Amino acid sequence: MNVTEVSAEGLKHELKITLPAAEIAAKVDAKIAEVKDQIKLPGFRPGKVPEQVVKQRFGDSLLNEVFQEVLQNAMQTTLEERELRPAMQPDLDFGEGFTGPKEGEDVEFTIKLETLPDVPELDFSTVTLEKQVAEVSDEEVQKRLQQLADGQRSFEDRDEGAAAETNDQVNIDFVGTVDGEAFEGGSAEGVNLVLGSNSFIPGFEDQLVGVKVGDEPEVKVTFPEDYQAEHLAGNDAVFACKVNAVQSPMDTVIDDEFAKNFGMENLEELTGRLKEQVEGEFGSFSREKLKRDLLDQLDGAMKFEVPEGLLDAEFHQIWHQFEHQMEHESKTFDDMEKSEDEYKEEYKTIAERRVRLGLALAEIGRKANIEVTQEELTQAIFQQARNFPGQEQQVFEFYSKDPQAAAQLRAPLIEEKVVDYVLELATVTEKTVTEEELKAPLDDDEVI
């Protein structure tokens, strides 16, 4: 094998590789010797087929099989010897008209690739971070208790002739039409609806305040532009309703008996569980902000060239999602706050940040020998499977047969491990904040 460097500019490399015909032929002969005893042909005893006959009958297929092995070995050897780590799958060019190897001819091709950059090392002990923490107040726990009570609330019939009020429950039949035509899913009978719950289309519940049993109001609404059923989005609709019942809410007593409805022995245990739940939520908010702060510092401190191919791929993924969202909302750039070029520039910046941080975290993890265990990956697959009740086995088979899909599950697990690793080395101090400050959104939703 002969390797010549054609060009090397930044992260981009182009190499010319020549695979000698003699090397390929030798491996074909070795392959024939390996398989000849397994071949059965009429007129020959098993294992006694001459190599020349094997070559005549199977030479072309064996040549192609050997060629793929030689090709892969040549690429791997070349990259290892020159210490080149591809950022993406290299491009191979065999020249115009190449249809495969031919006996007695050298194979010459070029390989073009972008390599992973040298990520600068950072002394993580110099990284200083502030972790926001908030105490769980009794008021917050009581609010959660009340939410549970509201969910368990029962209703009783109002006096005959009483008008429905906000927070009352009405039982209704309805038939919805658009332009006089009934539409699928627009009709139902015996539906309980709590007025003010915002369960139905905006404006629907407001028009039922004041109705009485036996009333047949006509409710006129407009489906939101982002309504899930696209054929209804933005359309005016009329719902012919019939009121079957008007009921007022009954107060739910929050006591030990109430707690037993949730599998708890008493109210004290339920209150404790709710406090733990809120503490977990606060911890997630705290972790999210701490991670964002860390990534911001890494992005500022670890500047290096990013592979153009990775950058383009990330940008096109982001841009595709953006265009899909615009299409879903039936918007054009004339409806947007910025021009198409301004949005592209903004998303290219986001894409570069994502790629740079992804490479930085991956390199930190590689040098620290951080890996995801099979048990951790299996647990992640379990989490995915829970999203598809009844199809758990298919989910497991999907990830077991698709290495790329499994890698997509593994990547965020490694990322979180790397973040934990860096946080252990960094200087982290705690700052007590209010619940509102802890939950306050970040400046933007771009984390990585």
Image (spheres, rainbow, N blue to C red):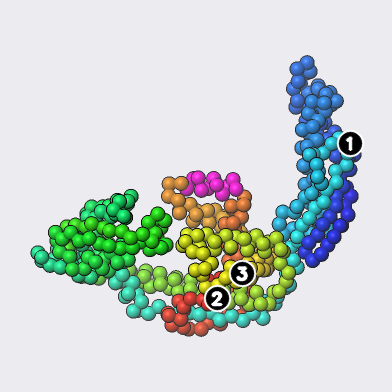
Q: Please tell me which residue lies in front, 212 or 175.
A: 175
What is the quadrant of residue 240 in the picture? bottom left
Q: Nearer the viewer, mark 2 or mark 3?
A: 3
Q: Is residue 376 above or below residue 282?
A: above
Residue at screen point 10% across, 65% down: 161
Tell me which amino acid carries mark 2. Leu
Marks 1/2: CA distance? 63 Å
Q: Which mark is residue 341?
A: 3
Asked if residue 67 can be seen in this view, the reply is no
Q: Nearer the viewer, mark 3 or mark 1?
A: 3
Mark 1: amino acid:
Gly
Say which amino acid is labelled 3. Answer: Asp
**Mark drawn on residue 384:** none
Residue marked by disc 2: 290
Neighbor class of circle 3 (other Cα within 10 Å; few <14, some 14-19, many 20+) is: few
In percent of width and height, residue 387 lies at: 45, 54
> Which residue range is magenta in the image?
392-402
- CA separation in Å, label 2 and label 3: 33 Å
Is residue 307 one of those drawn in magenta? no
| Residue holding disc 1 | 104
